[in-house]
Amino acid sequence: MSRAAQDVLGVLRGLQLVAEACGREHLALTKHLWSNSSLRELLSENVTQTTNSLRAAQQQPGIELQKLQQLLQESGERGYVVAQGLCQLLETSRLRCDHLTAMQRTNNNINSTQNVAASPAAATVAATPSNNVSGQVDASQLDISSITLQEFEEILSQRNKNRNVSLRTANTEKKQLPAKETPPVDTSKLNKDTQYVDNIMRMVASDNSSSTAATATEATPVALPELSKVAKQRRVPASRLGRMASFGGLFAGLGIGTINELTKGALGLGGSTNMREALLSPANAERIVDTLCKVRGAALKIGQILSIQDTNVVSPQLAKAFERVRQAADYMPDWQVERVMTTQLGAEWRQRLSSFDDKPFAAASIGQVHRATLQDSGMEVAIKIQYPGVAQSIESDIDNLVGMLKVWDVFPQGFFIDNVVRVAKRELQWEVDYAREAEYTEKFRQMIAPYPEYYVPRVVRELTTSSVLTTELVPGVPLDKCFDLSYEHRSHIAASVLKLCLRELFEIECMQTDPNWSNFLYDAPSRRLMLIDFGSTRFYKHEFIRSYRQVIISAAQNNRQGVLEMSREMGFLTGYETKQMEQAHVDAVMILGEIFRYDGEFDFGKQNTTERLAALVPTMVAHRLCPPPEEIYSIHRKLSGIFLLCARLNVRMNCVPFYNEIILGKFKD
């Protein structure tokens, strides 16, 4: 064998040895990866579970078959939720694009019409019949709400062979600015669509004049608050599957919106590179607001509760989104109102009323309120109608919303969101029980009777069920509409609200815990507070109130050690907290007790209490070892709302007499 052949064989032998070594190395690496792989454990666990399931199926085939059926049903529902969510997201995107396209086309048509009218050659073009078609506007694409009446008249004039068309009636002509003189309109030559619009304008004008005349002859009705300008009529999803689909669409939309923001941030197109900021982008905040306003109920209530949390607890972007949720709630369409009322009161419910306003004057998270008049007595009443499906979906709605927020990690560790959710679920179960609310309204009416500065409306029992509550319609405006009243009225409101809160807590030991300012109406002529909405009213144990009173007394007496000891006894602290946490807790209590230590007029408008408490929140959130007593959630929510109200009223008030009369005086007794 030649030397060259031997060299070739040597090379091939070397390659064989290298290949064998590589094979052994890869085999060893594969064994190592398999032995440390979670997939092996997963497959082993699945094999074990399958074996156990087969054994159980042999022993109890009926139960295992039922479990399999439930599993398949849940999987189908989850798949349906995801599919519905994606469909809703795609449909929303398509409608938005169509709307933007239509608006752009409308603007182009309007600009084209105005340019033709302003052009020096417009008269020549209009006089030529062959050229008239090119100047017409497509009426099917015209958004009438986006143009003025004069522009609409000019468009109709061009469409009707450039005859001057006027849509003004005798009433509306007086309200218009003087215009250039035009020949009189020959209404006989107007085409059908122009006549139709002219008739509509005349009907609206006649309705306004007739309603004005009727109002002048009748007695002045009770003034009512108005719905938010952004509120709209929209069906409430009543089924569990429909509500789940809404949350599925929200979850999918938030994910896509977050990815979109991160992509734009990476490409330098104005997005964000931070996950939390991308999640809480304006587009995602809009999705949250729209979904919660649609489903309403418990999810909307949680959003309203989170809207009043400090920005150190909930991010400013999320708090801003929930603030929009708190101010806006859609209302049911007429057919859905009719269905609820017929189900609750019977098909002849309208015969008990001489009048019923189909559009509500208030809409909240649980229900909406309509104005009506009783047939027999003529008394004006407020009928609160609960949204369908709300009572049955409290658990699932809250779990869906909070679960989504937990996934995106929007709560700090020390917030104890599970405790907040547990308390919220219980209180919401109370609020959706209108029969319970009617009972507490009557009880509160009796307990507050000795104080003439307050009034609780009467309950109409024959028109009240678990989902419909009818009460006397009382005059007054919500307290958030009283910020521009005279100082005398504002001072009287602040004193009345603060005294009411203290009397609720330390005298009758029963409090209406919802801090919503719309639950208080102020009647300026009688200088009385009208108290409404007792769905979240609850009694407190006497032992708890006695201990809480001692905490307030210690704070008013500047006794820091007394505050610390009583806080441990009540369960605010475990006794194992750091000195930093104990100091922050006592500082917070001492800040709240300032209004009872300051012997003089405390200036609520210029106080910095909120800022000082906010500075303590990060420490307490980071170092808190246990959640506070469950009663504190409702009490402090109410107290913070009252304190903020006094600040917004911008009043100066001496609170020491209230402390001596209600807190200390009752304690001495």
Image (tube, helix red, strand yellow):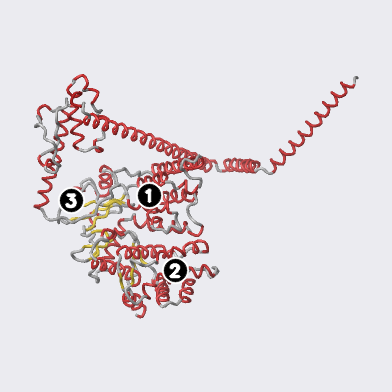
Q: Amino acid at mark 1?
A: Gln
192 sits to left or right of 291:
left
Q: Residue at the far bottom: name it.
A: 668
Instruction: Say whether disc 2 or disc 3 marks the residue closer to the N-terminus.
Output: 3
Q: Amino acid at mark 2?
A: Ala
Which quadrant of the view contains residue 434?
Answer: bottom left
Q: Quadrant of the C terminus?
A: bottom left
Cα distance, mark 3 to mark 1?
29 Å
Front position in the image: 444 or 73: 444
Residue 383 visible from this viewpoint: yes
Residue located beneath label 2 in the image: 588
Q: Secondary structure at mark 2?
A: helix
Front position in the image: 629 or 77: 629
Cα distance, mark 2 to mark 1?
39 Å
Q: Amino acid at mark 3?
A: Leu
Q: Neighbour class for label 1 at 10 Å: few (<14), some, many (≥20)?
A: some
In the rendered image of this protein, does residue 579 appear above or below residue 414? Answer: below
Q: Position of residue 656 (x, y in %)?
A: 33, 76
Residue 538 marker: none
Residue 392 marker: 1
Q: Neighbour class for label 3 at 10 Å: few (<14), some, many (≥20)?
A: some
Instruction: Say whether disc 3 or disc 1 marks the residue closer to the N-terminus.
Output: 3
Residue located beneath label 3 in the image: 353
Q: Position of residue 552 (x, y in %)?
A: 40, 73
